[in-house]
Amino acid sequence: MATLEVKNLHVSVTDDETKQTKEILKGVNLSMKTGEIHAIMGPNGTGKSTLSQTIMGQPGYTVTEGEILLNGENILEMPVDERARKGLFLAMQYPAEIQGVTNAEFLRAAINARRPANDQISVMDFIKKLDHNLALLDMDESMTERYLNEGFSGGEKKRNEILQLLMIEPSFAILDEIDSGLDIDALKVVSKGVNSMRGENFGSLIITHYQRLLNYIVPDTVHVMMGGKIVKTGDAELAKKLEAEGYAGLRDELGLDVKLVDDNH
């Protein structure tokens, strides 16, 4: 069993133009283990994506206090690639395009990066695994020979990220608004991929604005973020309540002094 813990995390971001620094996360606490699916919901501008980017070590986010522990080890000093090798995976809203590297080459390299030098995946095993997962996601084989994300539609990029997830088999996947811009059919395929990973060796932190995704990937735990903190934690019913009553209702119920970007959500 692997564990991921976020303890009293404070994160600031500096605006490139104004050079002003703003605290986005103001003491986030979160604990999860493999075998669990957690969802983080919250209005726009509350720091959900800042949390995912900070866990993965993206530059531009300054941790001023707190720690992030993967299996008890503080990962804050680790570069992104080391965090990935330790078992973290980030699927995001806008994945990058990489010319000159085919999907298949990338996938094989990513799998082998997490394996010892004397135990690299064989070509036959790789092809077998790839074929199985392409079928699961209803993806055409030709996708694997295309350059990574180049010329992919939004839906193709999302499926491709889930293909990466299935191939790499991380301990924890952080799925940041992977449902944005997906039609219902693509959403079902993406959800099918994530659900097929469920088990004692896999955990996921799903960040979403809307409850729709959680109809297909039902979480064990739902956290609500507002004003840079987790303000309420519950089960899947909490997400449904939010969808019905909106964030403003919960904010008022908890007596929080938080300005929402859009009080309708």
Image: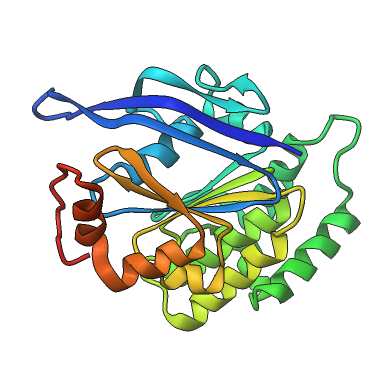
Residue furthest out toward the left: 18
Snapshot quadrant of residue 142:
bottom right
Position of residue 11 relative to residue 174, above or below, is: above
Viewer can see residue 153: no
**Quadrant location, the C terminus:** bottom left
**Quadrant location, the N terminus:** top right
Snapshot quadrant of residue 111:
top right
Position of residue 66 relative to residue 199, above or below, is: above
Front-most of 97 and 41? 41
The residue positioned 71% from the left and 36% from the top of the image is 2
Position of residue 101 relative to residue 215, above or below, is: above
Q: Is residue 124 left or right of residue 147?
A: right
The residue positioned 60% from the left and 35% from the top of the image is 4
Location of residue 96 in the rendering, given as x and y in whole percent from the top left corner: 43, 49
Front-most of 70 and 105? 70
Position of residue 220 relative to residue 20, above or below, is: below
Number of numbered discs: 0
The residue positioned 14% from the left and 61% from the top of the image is 263
Location of residue 32 in the rendering, given as x and y in whole percent from the top left corner: 60, 41
Q: Is residue 238 left or right of residue 219?
A: left
